[in-house]
């Protein structure tokens, strides 16, 4: 994203708040959107735009788990294995998913860089377990077959 | 309002709002803390201070406390323990700190802290003065139930910056360091990254941990997590000797402790003086002590023989000096001799210096204004300086502070903390300057004037104060100005009538409304302080205008009112007081015979020159054209290299003496080290010289004897003595261990003594003299300014390797707008020329500068700025050529 | 009375005839403003603007007995009444952080019936004199919030938000704000910090948000479900609302049912109905007719309710008396096949993962608890580990900075108290 596009989009966000700093999460989301992670340059951009120090912005990035400092696969698959989901087979579902993608049981990124798989805590969709978010979009009532279908579709999209 | 409560069955009465932890300490009950620090807002994070609290049950109808059958107050116990560090006391509160429950809670918290602590006390710098260690001995379980194999592991030596190292395993996440940087230092460059047990302290500023105050975090860190590169692994705390001293790097005069081991300084710590530095020091004060132990120190007298410097005995050297001086005096008269002393010398030495020249040799040529001191002096503080009893640490709402032409964060760092702190506590802060400075963020009013128009700006303020009324229609002049005590008010009012904000606006570039608002806000306060520095210029009319403003607003003669001049050196104030200027004698008595000033002396006005602790020939452009030059020095300075005789002097840590700080506070310092080789204190050298020149009565055996004479002969210093300067004060002794978490000893605390200003005398009459301002500065063209910076590359600082990378290298700072116009980018070379002098330096684009202003910060190692501007000029008139150097 | 929605006589009926909160289940398309308005939408706001003083709205909410549905169950009208009357600036902040494991009710309201939330928010703003409200959603709700923003836009267009709403002198802007993955930001003061762009670490209380809230201004923080209750209360009156539920726990509540249950989901019921209705009639019991071993009635932070008492009335007081407060009413069912230490290890991991690190007992205690659970489940337990768990919990108890730390120890302590044998079974033979 160009810095001009960023500033333009940020202007809309800043209007919501009486203080600039309130927009920091949204600014980081914007910067992270295209590539699934935040580069050093992004942190600087955010700091400058919001009149914060780089250290303060970095602290924010470190505190909130949806921000990443490392690239992930193009599709970030986050499977909930928290208690309510686990009671409905999420642990095993997760392990099988990793296996089918050729990943170690704890998850990771596929060799083609397309998928990163990781376990997360509750996603507020326990009634539709097993659930996953792929780039923050919900996929619910998952079965192995359903998941395979989703993955196949994403592979096709590339 | 006072509140009475009971702590462990003992009653204590404290002011309302006091925290339980402080109330307990009043009666000697120590509630253990980690995150709490009395200088910062309480956060209640570590939970070490949990106590049981009960509140009296109050009868709804009568409003009285309920009593039971036995006549005891009925107490409702709070269901959960309370953090004593966050809870203010209340009437009738009952606090229990000595129960089994409280002991269990403390034990629990300590056990938690230790589960992820490495327990590497034997190799830890904090070992022996570590609150965690101490409290563990006192309150902890003694055995660990945590699986050692699951210990949290993290970096043991994580550099937070090049000065401070973090041991992440030892950190207990009390956030004292991050809060200090945020709340007190105004440099939020430390933060907590990640969550939960993965949380850690980080710094990502560039350079990392970019702050002048970083060392303080190591003092307040309650474990061995933060250490300075300087002290790390250099000594165990119990091997240290401690000497109360005063920092000699700027005019603030921070109280410090020199911690020595085997005759060397291994650590400098702050010493509490609530009136000066509270419990802080800046990094220069902390780290720039290495000059003491430098191998470059002069240790033997040197004499020029056949073009070479050879080592000689003191006798030989001093005899030679005496002989030559006498000869020159006889041949050309005493006025052929002059003396320049540095404002770093203690009072005793300065006093003898001028006495030697004036009384023994008989010459009026005395000055201190060279180097950083050139071009900025003060002569109004003696009348309208901040009155005795002023405590910047306690001002807030109701006080207005006007800072004029000074970048405090660079020039007087701890004064920055105090002024910013006052603003934090509600003071009105007007920051007036030619460029953006760090203080702007705390300011309620920012006035950005055109360089050269500070006087006009003050006249504009005076105009508003003298010609306008407030919303209630009342005059803005202070109630304090008793007509009988002020002369010239009507005349002054008439003079300033033409200096309307509108007119001043066109000259200074400050909007008229901003001038008006600032003047109203300033005058509306109950107390007012004006702090002015060199970037306002040094025109006598400016000083007069400042004094007039202080007087007509009534901000004189009372504590927390008056003027502070941000002079450059540790004892610049002393130099002014003691008449180290050619036109004044000690105690501000006018000299009958005006002598030559430093520039005149150096430019051939004298044949023989005595230099003590100054480097007047540092600017390489300057030719030495003297028959005889004597230099008392620590190092082979540029001036010493040209000298006929070089006399090795001792450094501050090696002697005792006194300095007078910016607020006129005279402070004594003890000797901590032995001098190297044959070096002698300056006062002693001067004394010997005087005796050899035939002076009588120069039998001072110690600096105390000199000081005693000063107190006897100079009214300002009347009633002062070393004994009174070192009167122990009731500091929060019992708080020491959490004020400086890392201090195993009780440091001595003195307040020193302030000399009273004329304004404080009941009978003093203020004369509102009018002086016309300098010509209006040009509104076009480029101005070159030479701001003072903390890390200025001076000789003493240069001896501290650790700070080498912090020294501001010579560059030309340019505003982004100008850079665009001139096609300049960071690092490209830029040519600057003023009146036939020119220089090419790398450029740095700096958004703090307004357009039309370029800055070459003062770097004392090469004095580029002085060379360009001429010494003593803090900014150029216009007529400057700036351009991108071809081929860069 | 008969024409009012959900009107049933007390005690007769477990189910409501109509949903009051989850109205999208009865009225398809109510997420659009047209349908919402066609079914009485925004009439409560209209009524308030035309006929009620702000204080009267607060009084109605007070009289209804509505309590906060975010977990702490604080009386909502009382909270609103704490806002200083003369405060020049106040805020409403809607807590849509919904991150408690086992909780997914706010999500359904936002997805299905967003205008009712917006109307409730507007009523709250009107009552406390706020002209700006923020809805703070967990970061994972990004896609959901796209639709919610659409609803907001509709409300602006229809004149129910914005300047001088419907010609009154009441103006309101509602802004959406997304968090970024931190459970602690559901805690109201941490939420406010986060909204201010800081680390989501809780603030010391007092001062409470109603005094010193967002940007230091008096602020009401309410849960999504709480506010969704407000329009029907204002429209039909507190007496109507009090027909539902019990004397002390009036009204309706959405119960989130998850875990070992045939039909997991949200069920909107009158407070006080027996547990049997929720588990059996709504949820269809545990899979394959298995027995229920225990229930966590308020998500991960529950006290464990051992066994299954079908007649237990589901209201605040009865659950409190049973030792497991109702909280957000997120019922996680554990059937006989579930290994309790395994389940509690899961929630302990959750709290360790989400501890913000501000205070010692929570930061270190959750880390330590998880470590002990790990070795318990690995078959490497030390003798005395069960006692150790209790002791760690005791050292956290009452000593943490905010409730998260206290939450973490509830399932640990209560599960050991009730089902200790399951723990002992993990301690190797001979070392007991
Ligand atoms: C750790 C923690 C997490 C919380 N999470 C939520 C949450 O996700 N949603 C919510 O509405 N309240 C949550 N709460 C409760 C809020 O602090 C607060 O009580 C609530 O938002 C008040 O709204 P109410 O009165 O409408 O319930 C949480 C509290 C704690 C201590
Ligand atoms: S502020 Fe000045 S006196 Fe204080 S420590 Fe720093 S240099 Fe020394
Ligand atoms: S919580 Fe009181 S000292 Fe840390």
Image (spheres, rainbow, N blue to C red):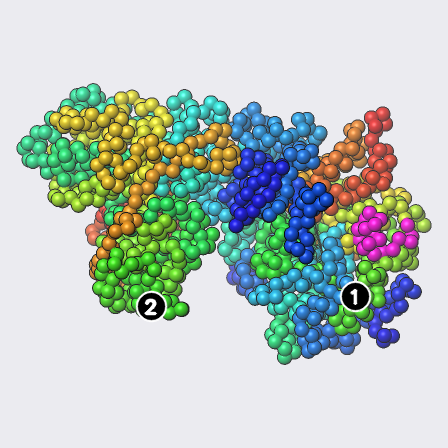
Secondary element under disc 1, as helix, strand or loop, is loop
Residue C212 position within the rendered picture, expressed as x and y whole percent measured from the top left: 59, 57
Disc 2 residue lies near ligand 2 with CB under 8 A: no
The chain to which mark 1 is attached is C
**In magenta stretch: residue B607:** no
**In magenta stretch: residue C323:** yes
Q: Which residue is mark 1?
A: C21
Secondary element under disc 2, as helix, strand or loop, is loop
Which segment is the magenta one? C309-326
Q: Are marks 1 and 2 on the same chain?
A: no
Q: Residue at x 47, y 25 (%)?
A: B235
Residue B212 position within the rendered picture, expressed as x and y whole percent measured from the top left: 43, 42
Main secondary structure found in the magenta portion? loop
Q: Nearer the viewer, mark 1 or mark 2?
A: 2
Q: Residue at x 66, y 41 (%)?
A: B52
Residue B840 position within the rendered picture, expressed as x and y whole percent measured from the top left: 29, 48
Q: Residue at x 23, y 56 (%)?
A: B767
Determine the CA span between mark 1 and mark 2. 63 Å
Lateral position of residue B607 relative to residue B711, left or right: left
Specify the label residue B468 is tagged with.
2
Please tell me how crowded label 1 is: few (under 14), some (14-19), or many (20+) other residues with Cα within 10 Å.
Answer: many
Pick the front one: B703 or B15: B15
Instruction: Please indicate, yes or no, whether residue B693 appears anywhere in the rendered image.
Output: yes
Determine the quadrant in which ligand 2 lies. Answer: top left
Specify the label residue C209 is tagged with.
none
Lateral position of residue B726 relative to residue B737, left or right: left
Pick the front one: A141 or B743: B743
Instruction: Please indicate, yes or no, whether residue B227 appears anywhere in the rendered image.
Output: no
Q: Residue at x 71, y 68 (%)?
A: C59
Pick the front one: B275 or C420: B275
The chain to which mark 2 is attached is B
Lateral position of residue C279 relative to residue B837, left or right: right
């Amino acid at each position: 994203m160009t810095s001009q596009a960023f500033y333009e989009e940020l202007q809309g966000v800043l209007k919501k708040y009486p203080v600039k700093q309130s927009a920091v999460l949204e600014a980081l989301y914007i910067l992270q959107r295209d590539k699934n992670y935040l580069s050093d340059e992004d942190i600087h951009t955010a700091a400058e735009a919001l009149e914060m120090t780089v250290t303060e912005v970095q602290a924010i990035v470190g505190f909130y788990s949806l921000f990443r400092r490392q690239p992930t696969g193009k599709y970030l698959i986050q499977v909930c294995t928290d208690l309510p989901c686990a009671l409905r087979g999420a642990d095993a579902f997760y392990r099988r998913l990793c296996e089918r993608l050729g990943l170690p049981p704890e998850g990771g990124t596929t060799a083609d860089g397309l998928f990163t798989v990781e376990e997360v805590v509750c996603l507020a969709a326990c009634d539709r377990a097993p659930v996953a978010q792929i780039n923050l979009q919900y996929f619910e009532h998952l079965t192995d077959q359903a998941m395979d279908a989703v993955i196949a579709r994403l592979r096709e999209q590339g | 309002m006072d509140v009475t409560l009971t702590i462990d069955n003992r009653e204590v009465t404290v002011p309302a709002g006091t925290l339980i932890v402080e109330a307990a300490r009043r009666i000697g009950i120590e509630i253990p803390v980690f995150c709490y620090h009395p200088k910062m807002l309480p956060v209640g994070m570590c939970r070490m201070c949990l106590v049981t609290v009960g509140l009296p049950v109050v009868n709804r109808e009568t409003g009285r406390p309920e009593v039971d059958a036995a006549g005891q107050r009925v107490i409702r116990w709070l269901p959960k323990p309370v953090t004593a560090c966050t809870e203010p006391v209340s009437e009738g509160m009952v606090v229990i700190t000595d129960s089994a429950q409280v002991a269990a809670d403390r034990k629990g918290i300590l056990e938690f802290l230790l589960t992820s602590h490495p327990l590497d006390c034997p190799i830890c710098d904090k070992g022996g003065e570590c609150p965690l260690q101490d409290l563990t001995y006192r309150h902890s379980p003694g055995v660990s139930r945590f699986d050692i194999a699951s210990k949290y592991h993290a970096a043991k030596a994580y550099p937070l910056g090049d000065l401070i190292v973090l041991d992440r395993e030892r950190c207990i996440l009390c956030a004292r360091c991050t809060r200090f940087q945020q709340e007190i230092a105004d440099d939020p460059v430390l933060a907590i990254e990640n969550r939960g047990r993965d949380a850690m302290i980080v710094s990502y500023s560039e350079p990392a941990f970019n702050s002048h105050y970083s060392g303080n975090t190591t003092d307040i860190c309650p474990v061995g997590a933060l250490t300075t590169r300087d002290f790390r692994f250099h000594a165990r705390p119990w091997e240290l000797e401690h000497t109360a001293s005063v920092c000699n790097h700027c005019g603030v005069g921070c109280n410090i402790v020199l911690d020595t081991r085997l005759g060397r300084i291994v650590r400098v710590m702050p010493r509490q003086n609530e009136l000066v530095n509270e419990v802080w020091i800046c990094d220069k004060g902390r780290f720039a002590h290495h000059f003491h132990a430098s191998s470059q120190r002069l240790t033997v007298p040197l004499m020029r023989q056949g073009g070479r410097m050879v080592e000689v005995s003191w006798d030989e050297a001093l005899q030679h000096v005496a002989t030559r001086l006498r000869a020159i005096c006889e041949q050309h008269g005493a006025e052929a001799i002059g003396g320049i002393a540095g404002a770093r010398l203690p009072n005793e030495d300065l006093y003898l210096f001028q006495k030697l020249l004036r009384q023994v040799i008989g010459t009026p040529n005395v000055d201190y204004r060279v180097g950083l001191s050139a071009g900025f002096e003060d002569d109004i503080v003696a009348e309208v300086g901040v009155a005795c009893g002023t405590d910047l640490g306690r001002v807030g709402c109701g006080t207005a502070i006007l800072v004029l032409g000074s970048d405090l964060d660079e020039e007087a760092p701890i004064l920055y903390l105090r002024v910013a702190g006052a603003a934090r506590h509600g003071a009105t802060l007007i920051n007036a300057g030619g460029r953006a400075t760090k203080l702007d963020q705390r300011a309620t009013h920012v006035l950005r004037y055109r360089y050269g128009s500070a006087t006009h700006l003050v006249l504009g303020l005076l105009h508003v104060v003298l010609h306008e009324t407030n919303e209630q229609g009342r005059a803005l002049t202070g109630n304090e100005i008793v007509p009988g005590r002020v002369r010239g008010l009507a005349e002054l009012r008439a003079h300033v009538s033409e200096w309307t904000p509108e007119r001043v606006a066109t000259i200074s570039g400050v909007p008229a409304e901003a001038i008006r608002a600032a003047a109203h806000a300033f005058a509306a306060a109950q107390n007012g302080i004006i702090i002015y520095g060199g970037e306002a210029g040094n025109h006598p009319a400016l000083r007069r205008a400042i004094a007039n403003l202080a007087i007509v607003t009534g901000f004189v003669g009372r504590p927390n009112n008056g003027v502070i001049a941000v002079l450059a050196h540790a004892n610049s104030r002393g130099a002014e007081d003691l008449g180290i200027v050619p036109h004044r004698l000690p105690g501000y008595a006018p000299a009958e015979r005006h002598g030559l000033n430093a520039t005149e002396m150096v430019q051939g006005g004298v044949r023989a020159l005595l230099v003590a602790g100054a480097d007047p020939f540092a600017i390489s452009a300057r030719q030495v054209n003297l028959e005889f030059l004597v230099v008392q020095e620590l190092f082979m300075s540029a001036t010493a290299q040209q000298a006929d005789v070089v006399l090795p002097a001792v450094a501050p840590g090696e002697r005792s003496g006194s300095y007078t700080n910016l607020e006129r506070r005279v402070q004594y310092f003890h000797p901590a080290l032995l001098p190297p080789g044959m070096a002698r204190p300056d006062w002693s050298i001067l004394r010997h010289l005087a005796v050899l020149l035939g002076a009588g009565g120069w039998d001072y055996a110690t600096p105390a004897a000199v000081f005693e004479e000063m107190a006897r002969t100079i009214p300002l210093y009347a009633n002062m003595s070393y004994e009174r300067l070192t009167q122990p004060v009731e500091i929060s002794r019992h708080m020491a261990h959490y004020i400086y978490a890392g201090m195993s000893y009780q440091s001595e605390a003195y307040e020193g003594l302030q000399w009273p200003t004329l304004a404080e005398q009941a009978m003093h009459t203020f004369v509102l003299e009018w002086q016309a301002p300098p010509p209006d500065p040009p509104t076009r063209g480029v101005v070159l300014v030479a701001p003072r910076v903390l890390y200025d590359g001076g000789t003493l600082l240069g001896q501290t390797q650790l700070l080498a990378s912090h020294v501001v290298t010579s560059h030309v700072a340019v505003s982004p707008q100008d850079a665009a116009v001139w096609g300049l980018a960071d690092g490209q070379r830029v040519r600057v020329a003023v009146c036939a002098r020119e220089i090419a330096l790398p450029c740095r684009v700096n958004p703090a500068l307004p357009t039309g202003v370029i800055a070459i910060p003062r770097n004392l190692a090469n004095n580029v700025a002085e060379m360009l501007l001429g010494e003593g000029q803090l900014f150029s008139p216009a007529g400057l050529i700036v351009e991108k150097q071809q081929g860069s | 009375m008969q024409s009012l929605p959900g009107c049933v006589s007390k005690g007769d009926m477990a189910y409501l005839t109509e949903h009051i909160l989850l109205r999208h289940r009865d009225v398809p398309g109510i997420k659009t403003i047209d349908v919402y308005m066609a079914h009485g939408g925004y009439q409560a706001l209209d009524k308030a603007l035309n006929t009620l003083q702000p204080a009267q709205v607060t009084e109605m909410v007070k009289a209804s007995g509505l309590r906060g549905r975010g977990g702490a169950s604080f009386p909502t009208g009382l909270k609103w009444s704490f806002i200083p009357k003369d405060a020049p600036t106040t805020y409403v902040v809607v807590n849509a952080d919904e991150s408690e494991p086992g909780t997914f009710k706010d999500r359904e309201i936002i997805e299905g019936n967003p205008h009712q939330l917006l109307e409730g928010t507007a009523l709250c703003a009107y009552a406390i004199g706020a002209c700006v409200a923020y809805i703070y959603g967990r970061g994972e709700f990004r896609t959901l919030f796209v639709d919610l923003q659409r609803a907001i836009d509709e409300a602006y267009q229809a004149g129910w938000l914005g300047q001088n709403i419907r010609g009154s002198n009441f103006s309101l802007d509602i802004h959406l704000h997304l968090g970024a993955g931190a459970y602690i930001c559901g805690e109201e003061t941490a939420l406010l910090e986060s909204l201010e762009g800081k680390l989501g670490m809780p603030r010391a209380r007092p001062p409470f948000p109603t005094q010193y809230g967002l940007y230091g201004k008096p602020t009401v923080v309410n849960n999504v479900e709480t506010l969704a209750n407000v329009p029907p209360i204002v429209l039909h009156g507190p007496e109507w609302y009090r027909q539902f539920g019990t004397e002390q726990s009036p009204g309706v509540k959405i119960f989130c049912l998850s875990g070992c249950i045939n039909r997991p989901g949200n069920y909107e019921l009158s407070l006080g109905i027996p547990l049997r209705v929720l588990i059996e009639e709504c949820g269809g019991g545990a899979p394959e007719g298995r027995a229920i071993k225990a229930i966590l009635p308020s998500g991960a932070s529950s006290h464990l309710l051992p066994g299954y008492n079908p007649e237990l009335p589901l209201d605040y007081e009865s659950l409190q008396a049973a030792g497991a407060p109702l909280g957000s009413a997120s019922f996680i069912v554990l059937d006989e096949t579930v290994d309790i230490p395994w389940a509690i290890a899961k929630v302990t991991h959750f709290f360790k993962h989400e501890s913000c690190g501000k205070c010692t007992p929570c930061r270190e205690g959750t880390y330590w608890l998880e470590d002990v659970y790990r070795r318990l489940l690995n078959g490497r337990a030390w003798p005395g580990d069960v006692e150790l768990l209790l002791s760690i919990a005791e050292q956290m108890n009452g000593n943490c900075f905010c409730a998260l730390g206290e939450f973490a120890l509830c399932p640990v302590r209560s599960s050991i108290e009730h089902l200790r044998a399951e723990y002992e079974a993990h301690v190797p033979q001979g070392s007991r």
